[in-house]
Amino acid sequence: MPRSKPRPGANVDKYMLRTEELRKNQEYVSNLVKQDCITHWSESGGKQILEKKLARDSKAASEELRHLNTELKTRRRAKLKDFYLEQDVAYEKELNEMGLAMVKARV
């Protein structure tokens, strides 16, 4: 069987279809690249926000610990002062029961 001749301009039509297909694919890839850039940008922004929030929280926690430590020291000193005063009173009472006296500095 003899081959039929392709119609005139068929190769041009085929080329135009292929060119249009390549253009659409290139547009699709370009959109994917844009979306990827936007995704990376938004994720990095989220990381920065999270890092700043963690830094603020850490600073607030360390500040709170510093205040708590100061308050704890104040309370310990007050308790120790009360304890030593009670011990002095008890010791003085014990000495008085034995007929002795404790020498106190005059202020």
Image (cartoon, helix red, strand yellow):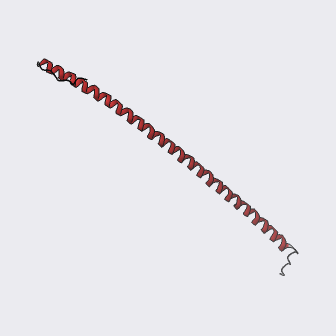
**Which of the pair 85/19 is nearer the observer?**
85
**Which of the pair 48/67 is nearer the observer?**
67
Please indicate whether residue 76 sits to the left or right of residue 10 in the image: left
Q: Position of residue 35 (x, y in %)?
A: 67, 55
Residue at 83% over, 80% down: 3
Please indicate whether residue 85 sits to the left or right of residue 60 in the image: left
Residue at 28% over, 29% down: 80
Q: Position of residue 63 (x, y in %)?
A: 45, 39
Give the number of callouts: 0
Please indicate whether residue 103 sits to the left or right of residue 14 in the image: left
Q: Residue furthest bottom?
A: 2
Q: Quadrant of residue 85?
A: top left
Please indicate whether residue 39 sits to the left or right of residue 13 in the image: left
Q: Position of residue 88 (x, y in %)?
A: 21, 24
* Vertical relation: 61 (above or below) 33: above
Q: Position of residue 103 (x, y in %)?
A: 17, 23
Q: Quadrant of residue 37?
A: bottom right
The quarter of the rendered structure image containing the C terminus is top left
* Vertical relation: 60 (above or below) 90: below
Q: Residue furthest left?
A: 98
Residue at 53% over, 44% down: 53
**Which of the pair 67/43 is nearer the observer?**
67
Q: Residue furthest front?
A: 107
